[in-house]
Image (spheres, grey):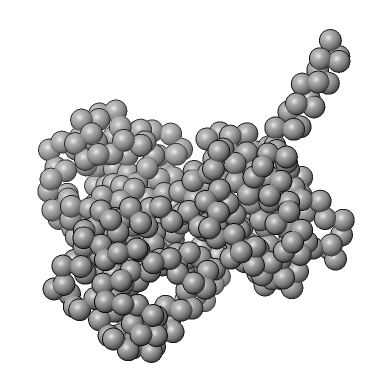
């Protein structure tokens, strides 16, 4: 995953370890580590006690020594301090000295954080920064299923546009169908939110039948319905797994590695657009239109990146891809070497309409536009030099 993997990893390096702003008023101070050690060194002799000691435990598998170790310790110590009142435990597992312990715990990826919550194990794929890790763990602490009991919760559910979401209608918490739904929700928690309602009025507004489950892709107005009432969590999980790669999805810091590794044939179609910018908003609306028109195409997946979410990466992306991120862009990116090809737009008034965008995307999917084209030209030039 060389290329764009390290491109995204740069964000993690840049977002860790910034000091608190000097002179800030007391009410605006950012948390800083108080110096008290809270992160445990987890070994063969104490790992059972460590996992039993807290409802949620975050363990990092790493190698000792070096500046990376120091950075990881700062991040985990600050996160442990912030979440101390929540009872979240933190620890390190030494990949060299305690390899057997790591194996028992199912920790296979070095420099990765594993979250243990009862019998559930979640691998954290977000950036290594205290704020993002804390946000992720707060989501983990919540129940995997959120209940919709009236119009207020229903409006909040309907306002979720950027994330995938799953909802089901059941008789109650003792329903076997709901228990299967809740078990499946735990497998995707907290990356994909699951909702349930027991209220017939809410179900009617969502056009849900009893024991029916709907999956909403990001930015889609109409859901996908699980064909028949599920008999168990495996059917629900398989349904969500099949549809979780959305036609249009937003890159977010907490899930950027998971998103980037979910490529199709080694490429991603990537769109840059600032939602708060008029041109960016117009371009994003066009992307949504194209995505809705092509939601049944399993080969199409567009990653939308709002540059304002990643300010430290803007100069790096502009240099790497040779584009101007002060205006919308769309291109195809090779996940291995970061080679890219971008849709030509002559000026800021030359934004493509839906038909033009669909035509360009169709050329990409058919291989008529490829990041390998430049490589072929370079090889020919080298042959000519010989």
Position of residue 295 measured from the top left corner of the image (x, y, whole percent):
55, 60
Relative horizontal placement of residue 147, taking residue 256 as reference (left or right): left
The residue drawn where x is 21% and y is 60% is 231
Q: Is residue 360 above or below residue 27?
A: above
User: Which of these two is toward me, 46 or 275?
Assistant: 275
Position of residue 86 measured from the top left corner of the image (x, y, whole percent):
25, 67
Position of residue 304 measured from the top left corner of the image (x, y, whole percent):
61, 58
Can residue 86 be seen here? The reply is: no
Position of residue 347 measured from the top left corner of the image (x, y, whole percent):
87, 59
- Image quadrant in which you'd find residue 147: bottom left
The residue drawn where x is 26% and y is 76% is 210
Q: Is residue 128 above or below residue 82?
A: above
The residue drawn where x is 66% and y is 56% is 271
Can residue 333 be seen here? The reply is: yes
> Residue extending furthest top?
386
The residue drawn where x is 39% and y is 85% is 205
Quadrant containing the C terminus in the rendered view: top right
Relative horizontal placement of residue 40, taking residue 52 as reference (left or right): right
């Amino acid at each position: 995953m060389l290329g764009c993997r390290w491109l995204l990893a740069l964000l993690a390096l840049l977002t860790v370890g910034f000091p608190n702003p000097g002179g800030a008023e007391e009410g605006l101070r950012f948390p800083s580590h108080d110096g008290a050690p809270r992160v445990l060194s987890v070994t063969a002799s104490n790992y059972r006690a460590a996992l039993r000691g807290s409802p949620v435990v975050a363990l990092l598998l790493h190698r000792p020594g070096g500046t990376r170790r120091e950075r990881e310790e700062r991040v985990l110590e600050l996160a442990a301090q912030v979440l101390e009142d929540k009872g979240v435990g933190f620890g390190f597992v030494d990949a060299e000295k305690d390899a057997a312990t790591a194996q028992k715990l199912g920790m296979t990826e070095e420099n990765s954080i594993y979250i243990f919550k009862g019998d559930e194990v979640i691998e954290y794929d977000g950036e290594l920064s205290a704020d993002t890790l804390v946000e992720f763990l707060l989501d983990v602490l919540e129940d995997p299923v959120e209940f919709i009991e009236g119009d207020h919760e229903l409006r909040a559910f309907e306002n979720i546009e950027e994330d995938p979401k799953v909802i089901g209608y059941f008789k109650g918490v003792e329903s076997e169908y709901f228990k299967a739904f809740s078990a499946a929700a735990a497998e995707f928690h907290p990356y994909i939110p699951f909702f349930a309602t027991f209220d017939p009025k809410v179900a009617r507004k969502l056009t849900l039948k009893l024991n029916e489950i709907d999956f909403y892709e990001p930015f889609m107005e109409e859901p996908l319905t699980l064909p028949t009432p599920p008999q168990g969590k495996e059917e629900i999980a398989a349904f969500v797994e099949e549809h979780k790669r959305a036609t249009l999805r937003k890159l977010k810091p907490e899930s950027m590695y998971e998103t980037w590794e979910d490529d199709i044939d080694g490429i991603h179609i990537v769109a840059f657009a600032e939602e708060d910018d008029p041109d960016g908003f117009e371009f994003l609306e066009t992307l949504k239109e194209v995505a809705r028109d092509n939601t049944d195409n399993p080969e199409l997946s567009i990653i939308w990146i709002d540059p304002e979410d990643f300010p430290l990466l803007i100069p790096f992306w502009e240099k790497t891809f040779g584009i101007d991120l002060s205006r919308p862009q769309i291109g195809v990116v090779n996940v291995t070497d970061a080679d890219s090809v971008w849709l030509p737009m002559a000026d800021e008034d030359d934004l493509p309409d839906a038909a033009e965008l669909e035509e360009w995307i169709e050329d990409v999917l058919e291989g008529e536009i490829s990041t390998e084209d430049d490589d072929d030209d370079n090889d020919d030039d080298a042959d000519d030099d010989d």
